[in-house]
Image (cartoon, rainbow, N blue to C red):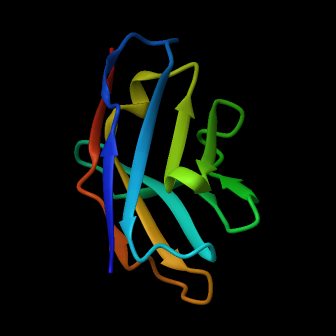
Amino acid sequence: HVQLVESGGGSVQAGGSLRISCQASGRVYNNYVFGWFRQGPGKEREGVATIDSSGRTIYSDSVKGRFTISKDSAKNTVYLQMNSLKSKDTARYFCAARPTMISEYNYWGQGTQVTVS
């Protein structure tokens, strides 16, 4: 079983930056894929970025070039560096994890709120 805890959310002005973190604990294996998702007010949850066990990353078009996902395997921590933030980035951001061979994320954190004004 894996536990995920997000932190680092907050309020920031448009154009600013913020870094959120996801601390994983429990039986975290190196072959896990981690993803960041977000859900804005009145919107459906959407994928933002993923990073696999090899460090390969994928970004949604809406954040490409502004957000960077990274991980520190020694600390079991995944980060999302968010730059040039826009009001439309306002959402609750969730961290998720899954084993590489499973298509659906089966571990989720409680989320951290990011508000851009």
Image height of 37 relative to 92, above or below: below
Residue 19: x %, y % from top left? 48, 29
Residue 72: x %, y % from top left? 60, 49
Can residue 49 be seen in this snapshot?
Answer: no
Residue 7: x %, y % from top left? 32, 39
Image height of 31 relative to 23, above or below: below
Q: Which is nearer the eye, 16 or 97?
A: 97
- Would you identify the image quadrant in which residue 54 lies? bottom right
Q: Which is nearer the eye, 64 or 24?
A: 24
Residue at left 41%, top 49%? 22
Residue at left 60%, top 58%? 50
- Would you identify the image quadrant in which residue 116 lies? top left
Q: Residue furthest bottom?
A: 101
Can residue 65 be seen in this snapshot?
Answer: yes
Q: Residue furthest front?
A: 74
Q: Which is nearer the eye, 20 or 86?
A: 20
Q: Is residue 75 left or right of residue 73?
A: left
